[in-house]
Image: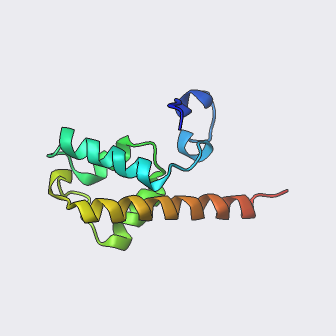
Amino acid sequence: MPNENVDSMVSSSSPVPAFARSPVLEAEVILEDLTTRQHLFPRMPLREVLAQTRACPVAAQRAMEWLGLDGTRAIGRVKRTELIQLARSLHRFWKRALAADAESAPS
C-alpha cells in the first residue's frame, strides 16, 4: 500500500472532514498505528490517541463504547488483545457508517 497523504486531497475550505472523504483504513493499518503510538506515548489517554489518528471519530467512539474501554485510560495500559479488538471494531463501524451515508445520500 503506497504511503499517501490522504489529508492533502481535502481542501481547507471543504465542509466535509478529511476522514469522511478518505478511504477506510484497514484494521491492520489502524492496529499498527495504535501500537506505534502505544510505544511512543504510553501515558496519553486512549481518547486523545484515537483523535490523532486519521480514523473517523464517531466510529472510534462507538468502538470504545462497544468494547467498554475507558477513554481516559492511558494507552500504555491497554492490552494487545484490546488494541486488536479496537482496531477491528473501529474498521467495522467506519465501513458501516460510510455504507449508511452512501445509501442515505440522494441520487
Q: Position of residue 18 (x, y in %)?
A: 55, 39
Picture residue at 62% right of the left edge, 57% below the top: 98
Picture residue at 35% right of the left edge, 44% below the top: 33
Q: In which quadrant of the rendered image does the C terminus lie?
A: bottom right
Picture residue at 20% right of the left edge, 38% below the top: 40
* For residue 27, above or below residue 12: below
Q: Residue furthest front?
A: 1
* For residue 69, above or below residue 31: below
Q: Is residue 14 visible?
A: yes
Q: Position of residue 13 (x, y in %)?
A: 62, 28
Q: Position of residue 79 (x, y in %)?
A: 20, 62
Q: Position of residue 100 (x, y in %)?
A: 66, 64
- Which of the 4 quarters of the picture holds residue 14? top right
* Residue placed most toward the observer, 31 or 13: 31
Q: Is residue 12 visible?
A: no
Q: Is residue 18 left or right of residue 40?
A: right
* Residue placed most toward the observer, 51 or 35: 35
The figure's colour scheme reads rainbow
Picture residue at 50% right of the left edge, 31% below the top: 3
Q: Is residue 58 left or right of residue 45?
A: right
